[in-house]
Amino acid sequence: MGKRRSHKRALSRITHFFQALGHGFVSVVKNLFILFVALGFFGVGAFLLWAATLPVPDFSSLDYRKEVESTKIYDRTGEVLLYDIHEEVRQSKVSFEDISVHIKNATVAIEDSDFYSHIGIRPVAFIRAILANLSEGEFSQGGSTITQQVVKNTLLTPEKLISRKFKEWVLALKLEQALSKEEILLLYLNEAPFGGNLYGVEEASQSFFDKHAADVTLAEAAYLAALPQAPTFYSPYGNNIEALNERKNLVLRRMLDLDFIDREAYEQALEDEVVFLPRASHGIKAPHFVTWVREALVELYGERGVQERGLRVITTLDFDMQREAEEIVARWGEDNSVKYNAHNAGMLGMDPKTGDVLVMVGSRDYFNTDNQGNFNVTLSHRQPGSAFKPFVYAAAFQEGYAPETVVFDVQTQFQTTCDAFGVPLKPSTDESECYTPRNYDNVYRGPVTLREALAQSINVPAIKALYLVGIKDALKMAANLGITSLSNADQYGLTLVLGGGEVSLLEMVNAYGVFANEGRRVPYRNILRIEDSNGKLLRSFSPPQDQVLDREIALQVSDVLSDNVARTPAFGSASYLHFPGRDVAVKTGTTNDYRDAWIIGYSPSFVLGSWVGNNDNTSMEKRVAGFIVAPMWNEMMNRVLASSSVETFREPKPATTASTKPIIRGVWQGGRVYEIDSVSGKLATPDTPPEYRKKIYNMDIHSILHWVQKGDPLGPQPTNPANDPQYTLWETPVRVWAEKMGYTANNTTPAPTDYDNVHTSDTAPQIVLTSPQDGSIHPKNAVIPITFTSNGAYGISRVDYHVNGVFVGSSRKAPYLFSLTNDLLPETTEPITIRVTVQDVVGNSGSASATFSRTLE
């Protein structure tokens, strides 16, 4: 009983404790809630008081507009001003009646379709923006109305601060109370940015169309309404014309949906061709490069930040080099236009060690609108032709193939639904589906090394190399080197190696820079640093360096591309690709339809690429890149090399050894090869002199697929090579070629079993020097006779004499007399060494030496 009462009392105490704790917790929560409510009322009251006292400026005066600081873009020295964004700001204010109704309706349609019904802000968008901004931790969204944009454009700084955003909302509400909708829309249209130093629809209409804002067409009005959202990106003078056209069409569609226009006007506006006037220069230097840099700045700081923050931008451009490149491209471009129907050209130069873009010439003449000069071809995507081949060969070298590896350059069918002669295997198959590529000169060379194939840009071996590597591995190699625009392996076939994908010159130059930089990739950059108007550093740019390619493979590619001997059969020994006394690796590329001509080359410290063609993709005259684009590239490269120190590529290590498969190390005659001594006819030994070694082949000639397993070239020979779907297609023309050349298939002459017994240590001459004696001393003017005895299996053919390692003479007839006189000996009392080397009639040799001294009296 006592224990039971004790338990009840303990339970009662615990219950009372938790009840008290619960009452206390409820009390604390209640007090906190009351506190938060009070603070909320206080905060709302303070905000309302602040909002009530916030003044609305007098928009009828020009004094209301905030002061802005101009962003300036400089070259890499920080001294040459390339562009001042606000230099000579151009803005013409007009009345509401002097603006086309199309401009007004187009602007409302695309920017703020509820403009005439809201109170300055859209409550739903307002709440959505608050939630989004709170989740992001900054006020980057605003669901901006035209009224809010007027406030932003004329009064507020571009920083994304909470206080600035609240101020924008409050001023928008007050502005709606102070001005009519027409007045607000007029303010917007007179202040809207249209790119560069253009502000307001009147100035934009005059600059773009040579018209007043009251006179523009519906289509022109749609373009004007499309621009202010992102005037740099949508600029009619940039590379995003297609995006601008899409946004113009969106404007027209919105106008149709809102009944601002009828369908007939809509469809007519879609068809109307609008021509923009040439962009005025206004002191801009390197305009393609500056436009590219400005787009990068907009990504970092937004349109308003670039326009108003007064940034000081130090770029990577070498302006002296840029001026030379512009002059060269303009001059040679004019020549190509006349000779080859090639009306445009571009050039881009880069430092491979830093990724710095030093030169960017995007066209022959930026301000020539007839030739779409404002379009930057160095950033556009075109087919690179054979300029893509080095990536495939680099992948091949990485997998175990070598520059010495041999493939057969013979006319080959690659489509597996056709036989080796290009006949469809099924009657229902169209012959056009068969794929038998040709070389650029319609010549087939038989067995060629990968070095020769790449250096001479031969197509058939390149396609075979791509098949051996695999399309996925080739694309992976290209991606590792910086080619980001080719991603889907399923959309490419074996023509990829001939430039079937589309890439930009910027990507290609950056990727070739990996070879120049011995396998290290440095992403390109166009800005070194950004400062504020007082010179304070805001941001600097240092791209990372990654070893994306084995150094030896990069050196192999450079060694091949700089091998003038290997390329001579195709280009000649004194072509535009050769720079006597300088190491320059280079590759050209011409598309099959002659729409693009490329050349990209590099020294260890500079990469230069050039492109020639037509912006509208029409074909040029049927000439290879060596004629069309190489001359301008050669002139620019020569100028750069003339002002730089001599550099050489490091020599790669040997890619193969004696144990490497014969076909990999360059032996195409058969799977077995052995060396004999030409004197004895027996197997050569390490003692066999090089000049007496002779290679014997068994003449078992096959394509490379007979000897290697695709994807594992250094592995075992395939047990059944015919399992490869390309085997028969490759093997058949090789057999045809071998028979045509008179080679007997499977001529397996047995190798000798005995080893060379002519060139051995026992048969080599054994020499004993009898004069001078070792340690002897001779007077200065004494004539010292050289005498020796020799024992060997064969007669002597030659005796050579060296003094202190320097050749001083020889004798070829018995009794092989020779003497040392003053003119053959150094003026010294130090010991002198004479070495006598005897060679017999079969190439064996033996030597002996003695050390003596001379007096100088």
Image: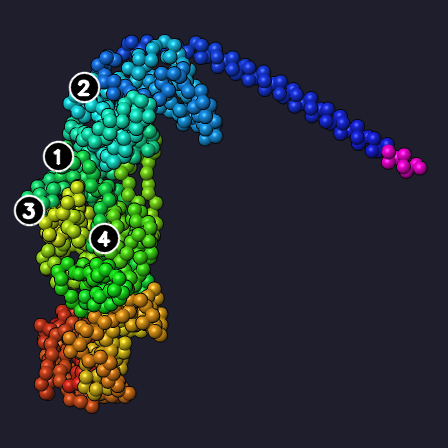
Residue 309, image x and y in percent? 31, 25
Q: Is residue 516 above or below residue 829?
A: above
Q: Which residue is mark 4?
A: 499
Residue that badge 2 annotates: 215
Quadrant containing the N terminus is top right
Indicate which disc, 2 or 3, sits on the residue closer to the N terminus: 2
Could you say which is closer to the camera, residue 830 or residue 745? 745
Label 4 amino acid?
Answer: Gly
* Residue 674 rendering spot, x and y as whole percentages: 25, 80
Q: Residues within 10 Å of mark 4 (few under 14, many from 20)?
A: many
The residue to which callout 1 is attached is: 370
Instruction: Give the label on residue 339, or none.
Output: 3
Residue 190: x percent and y percent?
26, 17
Determine crowd level at label 3: few under 14, some 14-19, many 20+ residues with C-alpha closer than 10 A: few
- The stretch of residues the image draws in magenta is 1-8
Q: Is any part of residue 231 visible from this angle? A: no
Of badges 2 and 1, the one in the foreground is: 2
Q: CA distance from mark 4 to mark 1?
A: 29 Å
Please tell me whether residue 484 belongs to the stretch shown in magenta: no
